[in-house]
Amino acid sequence: MQTLNSQKVQSWLLWFFRGILLLGMLILVGRLAELQIIKGGYYRSLAENNRVRRITINAPRGKILARGGEVLVDNEEIIKQIIFDQEQGIIKKEYNGEISEDTINEWQRLYPLGSAFAHVSGYLGEANEEEVFRVDGECQNKGVISLGTMVGRGGLEAYYECLLRGIDGEELVEVDTFGNKARTIGRKQPVPGEDLKTTIDYRLQKIIANRLSGMEGSIIVSNPKGEILALYSSPSFDPNDFILKNTDKIDEYFNNKSLPMFNRALGGAYHPGSVFKMVTATAALEEGAIGPDYEYNDPGAIVVNDYSYANWYFTQYGKTEGMIKLPRALARSTDTFFYKVGELTGPENIAKWAGIYGFGKKTGIDLPGEIDGLVPSPQWKKAVKGERWFLGNTYHLSIGQGDLEVTALQVNAMTVALANGGKFCKPHLAGQAECSDLGVKAETFFEIREGMVGACSLGGTAYPFFDFSPQAACKTGTAETPDEDKTHAWFTVYAPVEEPEIIVTVLVENGGEGSEVAAPIAREIFDWWFHNRNFTANGN
């Protein structure tokens, strides 16, 4: 028989176990509610991702075309096999078999001209950690840059990245528990980038690329509207090596002391030498320091405080020019004339007109990597060097030496202004011409043009052009460098004189004299353009 005490114990235990059971049921219901209601979407997403894979389909970039429609930069279609790896995720590798459900068509950049167009085209490189998973503020409509995306590095590829880059597509694929493809759920087609039509003359670009073999320097060819018809920097590199990930060649490019990746045409700073004398002449005439009738009796050398500033004709041959006017001084590149004219004009006015011609600042060309250069002045020297300006500094500036540094592109832009009668046209490879009047009197251009025609005529300094037709207007330059045994060879020229078609600027680093090294290169280009262009089909 149960006692009252035992009944109480049983009753307490019964309620205790009932409470535990009830608490367990409440916990179970709460957990189920959490899984189904609160975190249901999250776990559903995980489950979907376990069986659905997103495959990015890269969009083809826009092509880069020459002015005649020829393809300068292209794409080639490649077939890639899709492998679903449980540890590494989605793997794409090139596939040489037949197209199947496990393959996908993608695009790879192709540079048909290789090194001949490299510094203009630029190249592609894989997006780095600072670019991946971010939106380019310049082209937000292109979306997030995904892992593995190839983006422009240098040249037109970088400058027109937003235009050329397309919008990647995507394919949704269902896989089984082993990672094997079961079926395609959906597909979003990629949107190709836009093509870029440039001002480049396809055959001319190939021509100039062959003219600097084994040299360091650059060639720029433009027209009177500032359109770049051809541009080449030597040595160069092959952009295809970056697409093919040829690491040996890439390492060689970056470690080569000749800097093949460096665009000398717009990134190199050089003393211009005598090609700068047109600026000094403009400043002198426009500021009224001299007039068209000004004459100077060349002494061969000017001595200032035991320093001798000589003319090349006196140094090499012991002769003087006698009484000489501005056109003849340009044609003969008479340093003593420009020393005296520079003294009469003043360094401030020379620096002023150098700036008007576009020196000391970027031209604004649609390529990255352009530098300002440097136009010194008394104020600059005091501020930067803490020294006062001497007469010798004026002499050096007057003939394009001293601290003066310019780019080949700036020299070409100046020559364009001289050719078109006084309009500075922003150098460009795409888009419309942007020109502004320099405000130079017609009489000034007449004097300078007469001197440049004289340089390309019998008795001038550019002997390779003495027999050239149509008549050309030019200027040679031989710029001294820190190495006393070496000089930069310059030559800038346009033709025909009356209605100019092309302007060519040649720079050969440490090449020697402009008349002997740079002028013959320009002559070959002119021979092709004016005499052989219509008889060659492939530009060779």
Image: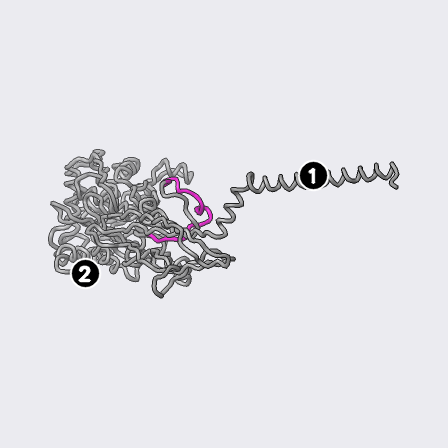
Label disc, if present, on residue 538 of the rendered structure: 2
Q: Nearer the viewer, mark 1 or mark 2?
A: 1
Q: Amino acid at mark 2?
A: Asn
Q: Residue at x 64, y 42 (%)?
A: 28
Where residue 171 appears, as percent x and y from the top left, is: 39, 51
Residue 155 at x, y = what percent?
Answer: 32, 50
State the SS at label 1.
helix
Of residues 143 and 250, the one nearer the viewer is: 143
In depth, the one of 374 and 340 nearer the eye is: 374
Task: Verify whether residue 44 appears in magenta.
Answer: no
Q: Is residue 133 magenta?
A: yes
State if disc 2 and disc 1 touch (CB < 8 Å).
no
| Marker disc for residue 22 | 1
Q: Quadrant of the N terminus?
A: top right
Q: Closest to the observer: 187 or 333? A: 187
Q: Is residue 510 visible?
A: no
Sequence-wise, the earlier of marks 1 and 2 is 1
In the rendering, at what x and y percent does residue 68 appear? 19, 51
The secondary structure type at the circle numbered 2 is loop
Q: Does residue 331 appear left or right of residue 258 in this picture?
A: left
State whether residue 324 is above or below residue 76. Answer: above
Amino acid identity at mark 1: Leu
Colour style of the rendered protein structure = one colour
The prevailing secondary structure element of the residues shown in magenta is: loop
Separation of marks 1 and 2 at Cα, in angstroms: 91 Å
Quadrant in which the C terminus appears: bottom left
State which region is magenta.
122-140
Where is residue 215 drawn, in percent x and y?
30, 59
